[in-house]
Amino acid sequence: MRLERPERRGRLRLTLPRRALGLGLRTPHVDDILERWPTVDWFEAISENYIDSAGRPRAILRRIAERYPVSLHGVSLSIGSTAPLDRNYLARLKRLVDELQPVTVSDHLCWTGVGGLNSHDLLPLPLTEEALSHVAGRVLAVQDVLGRPLALENPSSYLRFTHSTLEEPVFLRALCEATGCELLLDINNVHVTCQNTGGDPALYLEAIPWDRVVQMHLAGHEDCGTHLVDTHGQPVAPEVWSLYELGWRLGGGAPTLLERDSNIPAFDECLAELRLAERHRAGVQAAEACA
Amino acid sequence: MTSARSTLADTQQWLQSALLFPERVDASEAAQHLAPSAPLSALEHLAIYQRSYRVRLETCLREQFPVLCHALGCDLFNDFTREYLRACPPESYTLHDLGRRFADYLERERPDRAGGEGQQPWIDFIIDLARLERQLFVLFDAEGHEGEALAGPSTPDERLALGRGVVLGEYRFPVGAYHHDVRNGREPGEPLPERSWIALVRKDYTNQIIPIGGLPHAFLGFMRAGAGVREAMERAAGAFDLSVDEVERAWRGPGGTRERWIEAGMFVTKS
């Protein structure tokens, strides 16, 4: 780990080494972690599971944060919504951030609801100049509250709006330039979105502003025949590992985290799958050495 | 209906409405907003979100009300939750709030409300069970005794205060016992109506259901409202037309409530 001074802020902030490997913190694994304190570079906690907890979940997260770097990954910021920013949510998130001092604070490029409702789904945005300007304004507002850069993850999408005018990587690049925000690049989501909406995942990765990528996510998906669903319930697919290798070749890599949200296997099995990332990165290095 | 050149706000209103009310969207409207792909029409792309919205929330409610789901059976439980979600779509940023209005919804929309045969007891049972499960769910993440000193056997009555992690409940059915049985893998039948009182206690981050009687419920209720032990005894005795001595014997006698409740972690020490 090392301390770096973020561009927009004067405060020091812990950052992860580029080759760090992390795991999504999941309840079935908590006992394993607390009993063995396994070798993992960091854990990622889903913000909403903790921001309102005064009970066991938050107490456990505090204990884990004493031993490991922790990142906070949210699903309810609704950064793309045309509803007003939820200041109550932001204040609670800020309290959790202050308490844990996470290495990153992230959420998704999406919206979850308007008009006082919340779908609890990561809904896609039409990728337009209007949406870009709208999201950029909100990212700046959120960063002001948090006092640090926000990282945004490319969502998995199952539809494309007819009036979208920008490709997603172009949108993300422009957003980073306008706000100084960071990117959490989910490789599985790149694959799922491109399969579902007709994009080319290699071109997608080539267009990503790699200097803004602070983390990569890996996860599994389900093939429903006509489309892919980002279930986080299966091992990482071979196509996604291939894209991961491409990401390392193109961007030089970033700290990588494995997520599992359903059919959660034993902790050691998750850890073994995470370690596969090292093998794929070694393959990239070997190929580059031979070139 | 909005056009393909919708503003962002229009687009979001349209998509959200399409999730909440899938039956109101037809293929041509979907095609105005959404591009088809080789295998899927615009409407089929939309249907992926419509389905995942419903499945995610129904799954979440099953997790928040596992014993109620057991009591009703999955099909009937899903029917109730589907209607609940249509009537009370989620408003909060957190899924923890998803079941907040469920018991009230069941009470308001109880299936026997329009019938001429009076209220059916089994509906009271499921409403009570929904209330209990919600209380347990909330208690799990609520403020507990952590940060305060738990009382011990030697703590004098004058320094006892009801802990933050204690919730009192009163029900028309013995839902505490039913819940306990189901969570322990038994298959209890539907209980008969019988008033019951419970103290839900979170100690060391673990919830307990402690059956209590009407008098202890009143006593603890007075303490919750700020009374000390002596005042709560006097008020409970008055409410139940008993002498204070009788209440005190139940409190302080061998194996009395004082000893058991302190052991259960119901009291903290007032400074």
Image: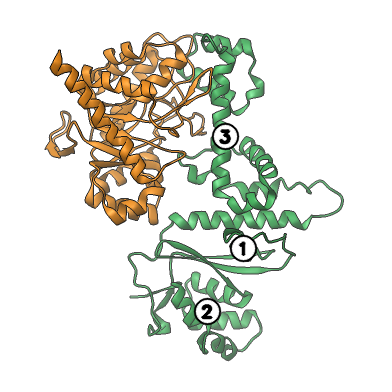
Subunit ID for the residue under disc 2: B
Pick whichever of labels 3 and 1 is earlier in the sequence. Answer: 3
Question: Of the residues shown, which amino acid type is indicated by label 3?
Answer: Val
Tell me the residue at 54%/42% (across/down): B60
| Circle 2 or circle 1, nearest the eye | 1
Q: Which mark is residue B232?
A: 2
* Protein chain holding label 3: B
Q: Are marks 3 and 2 on the same chain?
A: yes
Q: In the rendered structure, the residue with mark 1 lies on which chain?
A: B
Q: Which mark is residue B161?
A: none
Q: Which residue is mark 3?
A: B55
Look at label 2 and name its amino acid: Ala
- Colour scheme in the image? by chain
Q: Estimate the x, y position of residue A26 in percent, counting from the top left.
A: 38, 45
Chain B colour as displayed: green
Q: Earlier in the sequence, mark 3 or mark 2?
A: 3
Residue highlighted by disc 1: B181
Residue A234 drawn above or below residue A126: below
Q: Real-space Cα distance between discs 3 and 2?
A: 48 Å
Q: Is residue A147 visible?
A: no
Q: Is B135 on the left or on the right of A190, as rendered? A: right
Q: Quadrant of residue B122?
A: bottom right
Quarter of the image for residue A97 reads top left
- Does mark 1 fall on the same chain as mark 2? yes
Q: CA distance from mark 3 to mark 1?
A: 28 Å
> The residue tagged with tag 2: helix, strand or loop?
helix
Q: Colour of chain A?
A: orange
